[in-house]
Image (spheres, rainbow, N blue to C red):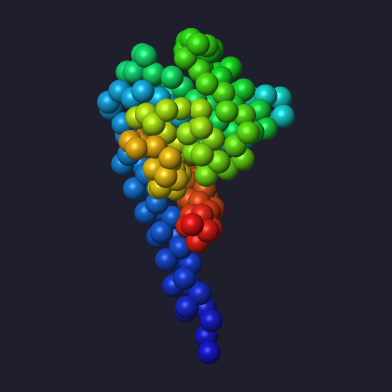
Amino acid sequence: MHVAGPLAVGVAALFAAAWGLVAWGRAHRVERAFDVIIVPGARVYADGRPSPALLRRIEGARALWERSRGARVVGTGHRGEAACIARELIALGIPEDRLIHEPEARNTAENAARSAKLLARERVVVVTDDFHVLRCKRLFREHFPEVEVHSVSGSRFPWRNAMRELASISTAWTRR
């Protein structure tokens, strides 16, 4: 029995799913104002600088804040992620009194649950990478009545992140 044929089909299907996830995510852009903008954390370097993924999310949140001047912005994530988000947003001109810190969440499900504990049931927009939109939308809808997800893109290798995200989606959805 040749394994190469079915293996090649499986790999091709996985790549197609990853690219579909990225393309679907890129279609999600928010143009209207919201009460709260949520920025899920991503890697922060040892020297305190945000990774490119986190910087894209921060810059996306600032752009949305420009349209929603009264909005509050939640930076959520452990290992210095929430503090880095706040520091960068302040540097980009968002007043500190509009920021909410959630420094305990270790994953997307916790980003949603812990953010919900800090907020009333408000209209929220989550700013995240294109490959992360589907899972964010599902997990945040468990906690908020009105959720939109705003996609930021720019990763040089979106398929690599999308492959990892497919594994995270399957894990998250089988646990629910």
Does residue 144 appear anywhere in the picture?
Answer: yes
Residue name at image x 49 percent, y 57 percent: 176
- Is 169 displayed left or right of 49 in the figure? left
Residue 78, quarter of picture: top right
Tell me which residue sits at (44%, 66%) in the image: 12
Residue 141 placement: quadrant:
top left
How far across and down, in percent of the image, does residue 19 sit?
40, 53
Based on the displayed image, in which of its 4 quarters is residue 126 positioned?
top left
Residue at the spot 52% in from the left edge and 11% down from the top edge: 96
- Residue most toward the bottom? 1
- Looking at the image, the residue that sits furthest to the left is 32
Relative to residue 163, is residue 64 drawn left or right? left
Question: Horizontal placement of 123 versus 116: left or right?
Answer: left
Q: Is residue 65 left or right of residue 32?
A: right
Residue 25 or residue 111, whichever sits in front: 111
**Residue placed most toward the observer, 54 or 158:** 54
Vertical position of residue 67 compared to residue 158: above or below:
above
- Visible residue check, residue 51: no
* Rendering coords of residue 97 (x, y %): 50, 11
Residue drawn at x 51%, y 39% as measured from the top left? 113
Image x and y of residue 28, in percent = 32, 39
* Residue toward you, 74 or 132: 74
Rendering coords of residue 74 (x, y %): 49, 25
Label tally: 0
